[in-house]
Amino acid sequence: MRRGEVCYHCRFWLGAGPREKGPKGQCRRFPPVVTDRAPAGSWPTTGQNDWCGEWQRAVGRAAAPEEAGTLYDEL
């Protein structure tokens, strides 16, 4: 995982709170999960600094300065 590849910068994450920027939000990568506590389904709640193997850069958000690109990012 490279620095910056966290939920906050992921295209599938929807932050909750002021201006949808977190500190917690919902991962929208997969459909809502149905459980006994949420029979209608709900998306997982994650922190803005959480991460997983499904991360993709959010479209329209510039990379943070500490995120050094790689040769393969432009392919």
Image (cartoon, grey):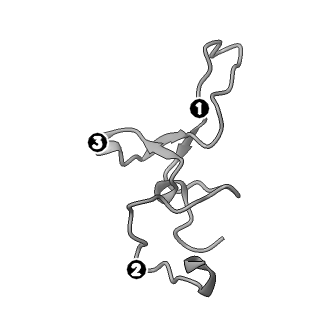
Which numbered marker is on residue 18?
3
Q: Within the image, what quadrant is residue 55 found in?
A: bottom right
**Considering the image in quadrants, where does the C terminus appear?**
bottom right
Amino acid type, residue under disc 3 in the picture: Pro
Residue 17's x, y, as percent?
34, 39
> Residue at label 2?
65
Amino acid type, residue under disc 1 in the picture: Trp
Above or below, comparing residue 55 to residue 72 in the picture: above
Residue 57's x, y, as percent?
52, 62
Q: What's the residue at 59%, 25% (across, down)?
A: 42
In this rendering, the count of numbered labels is: 3
Residue 29's x, y, as percent?
61, 43
**Considering the image in quadrants, where does the N terminus appear?**
bottom right
Residue 4's x, y, as percent?
52, 69
Name which of mark 1 and mark 2 comes first in the sequence: 1
Name the element at disc 3: helix
Q: Within the image, what quadrant is residue 28 found in?
A: top right
